[in-house]
Image (cartoon, helix red, strand yellow):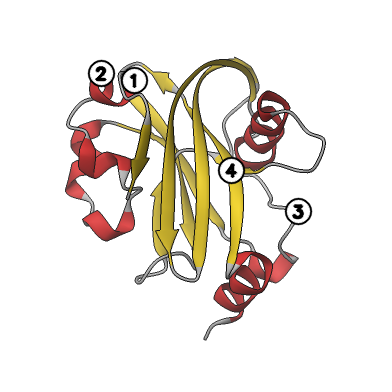
Amino acid sequence: MEAGKQELHKLYGNKLRVRVCGICVVDDRILLVRHTSVGSENIFWSPPGGGMEFGESAASALSREFLEETRLVVEVGEMLFVNELILPPLHAVEIFFQVKIISGDLSIGFDPEFSDGNQILQEVDFMSMEDIKLLPQNQVHGLFRKCETLEDILSLRGYMTD
């Protein structure tokens, strides 16, 4: 197993994790982060987000994660839906919020939980639903298999599973 995947599994494997994720739409495109070491092909595109820390509110955690991953300062808006993500040995309950960019210039960030040589963040980009649908399904977050349009994503409510 490659070093990045080993580090990922050591940090998060076989544990239930609570994550916050942000749906950020600009000009009919959604902001996504490409991770390595996640999934069967070591490529996984998903909305920015990450684990909550003890004593941290969901909004504060999401603002921190956006800054770490994308270098953007955001305003956290309405909670949209909850998703249970199970990609053994990873298991997370993800709370999705709508977010709005306040300031900053989009660029790839740095995940402080991973060592310098094993960063899992590889790329950040705004993508159209058409572009996302061209990617292999096992390389994108499960919410994109449930939705055909950005409006579908923004109208999701309740609890979902991958």
For residue 154, the mark is: 1
Mark 4 element type = strand
Question: How far separated are the C-alphas under marks 3 and 4?
Answer: 16 Å
* Crowd around label 2: few <14 · some 14–19 · many ≥20 (10 Å): few
Which one is earlier in the sequence, the residue at label 3 or at label 4? Answer: 4
Residue hosting label 2: 151
Closer to viewer: mark 2 or mark 3 = 2
Question: How far separated are the C-alphas under marks 2 and 3?
Answer: 33 Å
From the top left corner, tell me how far across and down residue 31 is, in percent. Answer: 43, 32
From the top left corner, tell me how far across and down residue 115 is, in percent. Answer: 74, 66
Residue hosting label 4: 19
Residue at 70 percent across and 33 percent down: it is 61
**Residues at discs 2 and 1 in contact (Cβ within 8 Å):** yes
- The number of discs equals 4
Camera-side residue: 104 or 158?
158
Which one is earlier in the sequence, the residue at label 3 or at label 1? Answer: 3
Residue placed furthest toward the right: 55
Asked whether residue 132 is in view, the answer is: no
* Crowd around label 4: few <14 · some 14–19 · many ≥20 (10 Å): many
Question: How far separated are the C-alphas under marks 4 and 1?
Answer: 18 Å
Residue 130 vs 16, above or below: the answer is above
Asked whether residue 45 is in view, the answer is: yes
